[in-house]
Amino acid sequence: MKLKEGQLGDIFQCFIHQLSKDVLNADYYETYREALEAITVKLSGKQLDNAFNYFIIDEYADLLKEIAQRLDEKQINIALNCCMDKLNDKNKHQNICIKYIQLLEIISNKCNEQQLNEAFNSSMDIFIDKNDNAYVRGGCAKLLGIIA
């Protein structure tokens, strides 16, 4: 059975709700995570963007890395734009910026040349002008080394 986009979004929201409950039984925690990974790689557009924004917190960083490795070209483009938008947001906390940089490191090996150029230019902008935080600039420097 193939689910429609709206159905995938509904299931995703239900699983997120259950995963975020403190009362979630530890026996089912891994099952929810595996299901979320399978569902997330089928999302597109705004739903995928929302998933990245939800999973960027420390608790789900490993899940996000697994998802990032399974994205197709269209999803990579969405993820890339999401990451670059968040990195260019001066109001984001440095730890969140670092998580997006780490995500870019993972997806960079699946990017085409145009996507790599966009990531490179965005990272250079942050490295040169837009971020006064040495920790974030250091992350951008590492990313630039990977992209180059």
Image (cartoon, rainbow, N blue to C red):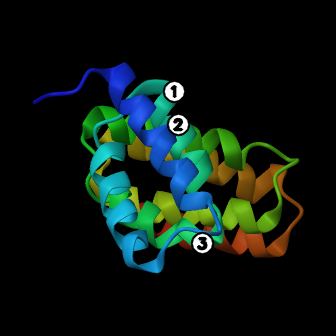
Circle 1 is placed at which residue position?
A: 46
* Left or right of residue 84: residue 80: left
Which quadrant of the rendered structure holds the C terminus?
A: bottom left
The one nearer the camera, 30 or 143, is 30
- Pointer 1 with pointer 3, Cβ within 8 A: no
The one nearer the camera, 14 or 36, is 14
Under mark 1, the amino acid is: Lys
Residue 97, relative to residue 15: is it above or below?
below
Which quadrant of the rendered structure holds the N terminus?
A: top left
- Pointer 1 with pointer 2, Cβ within 8 A: yes
Q: Secondary structure at mark 3?
A: helix
* Left or right of residue 70: residue 40: right
Which residue is at a point 67% across and 67% down the rendered structure image?
A: 98
Under mark 2, the amino acid is: Asp
Q: Quadrant of residue 97?
A: bottom right
Residue 48, relative to residue 60: is it above or below?
above
Circle 3 is placed at which residue position?
A: 59
Under mark 3, the amino acid is: Glu
Which residue is at a point 48% across and 31% down the rendered structure image?
A: 47
Q: Residue 11: x, y in percent? A: 39, 37
- Pointer 3 with pointer 2, Cβ within 8 A: no
Circle 2 is placed at which residue position?
A: 49
Give the CA separation, mark 3 to mark 2.
Answer: 18 Å
Reading the chain from its start, which is encountered first: label 3 or label 2? 2
Q: Residue 64: x, y in percent? A: 45, 61
